[in-house]
Image (cartoon, rainbow, N blue to C red):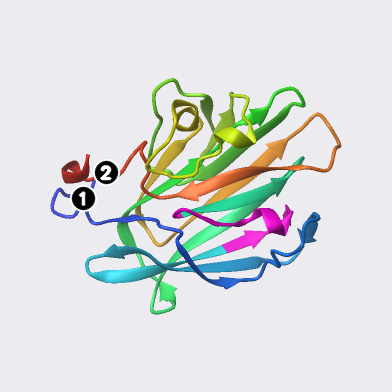
Amino acid sequence: MLPSSVQCSECRVNFSTIVQDSLDHSINTFMHYSQSTTLVFSNVCTVDGKALDLQMDIAGYQTKPSQNGVSSHMYKLNVKLNTNTTIKFTLLDFGGPTTVNKVLFSVLDIDADLNAGRDQWISGEGIDDYRYGDHVAVSDHRNCEALRFDALRHGHAHDNPSDPMLLSPKELSSSVALIYELVSEWTLTFGVNSQTTHESGRNFYLAGSTQLLRSTCPEYS
């Protein structure tokens, strides 16, 4: 448990401004990026008066690049069916890793196409706490040191989130807020299982503050 004097020094990740992007968003077919793909976002949060950046290193990524991008303080991440990709997130201060007391990081739109058995999931180690909304439609279980979250709800494009602070009941039910303590980096794997070989993908939305959990600080609760 962190001392109360530093408990509210947290990074609530904001994906508004991307400054480095190695994806070609004009491509509307699936691509396999066998080498690590790097994205950098500037001013993702301010901690103790310092504006921090965020680097995402994506390994073994199969995606339709045109479906990825910034969307209302979130980042839309497209993952091809029957694949998964692991992303290392690193907070940067003047280009180098920096440790913060807390990180609030949310994943939205963890849902499924139940007719085709296309279910989304995420998994990661080092998660200190997590929160769900009411009427949760995501399951969780621990596998050794990793926590895994699986979709339980059928989802459509029309119930994808458009504003992280204004989520419908369905959007809230498919969201999870992850809390990390004393970290400069964290790693998550994003996957889509499917019973079909149809070439398609599913989208995850990455955020910080949301209607589900604006902050871990009491004054923002």
Which residue, given by chain and number where applicable, does mark 1 sit on? 7
Above or below, comparing residue 218 to residue 52 in the picture:
above
189 lies left or right of 60: left
Which residue, given by chain and number where applicable, does mark 2 sit on? 216
| CA neighbours of label 1 inside 10 A, class few (<14), some (14 to 19), many (20+) | some
Residue type pointed to by label 2: Thr
Quadrant of the rendered image containing residue 112: top right
Above or below, comparing residue 32 to residue 35 in the picture:
above
Q: Which of marks 1 and 2 is nearer the N terminus?
A: 1
5 lies left or right of 17: left
Residue at (75% x, 22% y) in the render: 115
Range covered by the magenta-colored residues? 57-73
Q: Where is residue 78 in the image (x, y as percent from the top left)?
A: 66, 49
Circle number at residue 51: none
42 lies left or right of 78: left
Q: Does the magenta stretch include residue 132?
A: no
- Return the residue found at the far front: 158
Instruction: Specify whether residue 65 is in view.
Output: yes
The answer to whether the residues at label 1 and label 2 have Cβ atoms under 8 Å apart is: yes
Q: Where is residue 180 in the image (x, y as percent from the top left)?
A: 38, 49
Residue type pointed to by label 1: Gln
- Return the residue found at the far right: 197
65 lies left or right of 141: right
Residue at (44% x, 31% y) in the render: 168
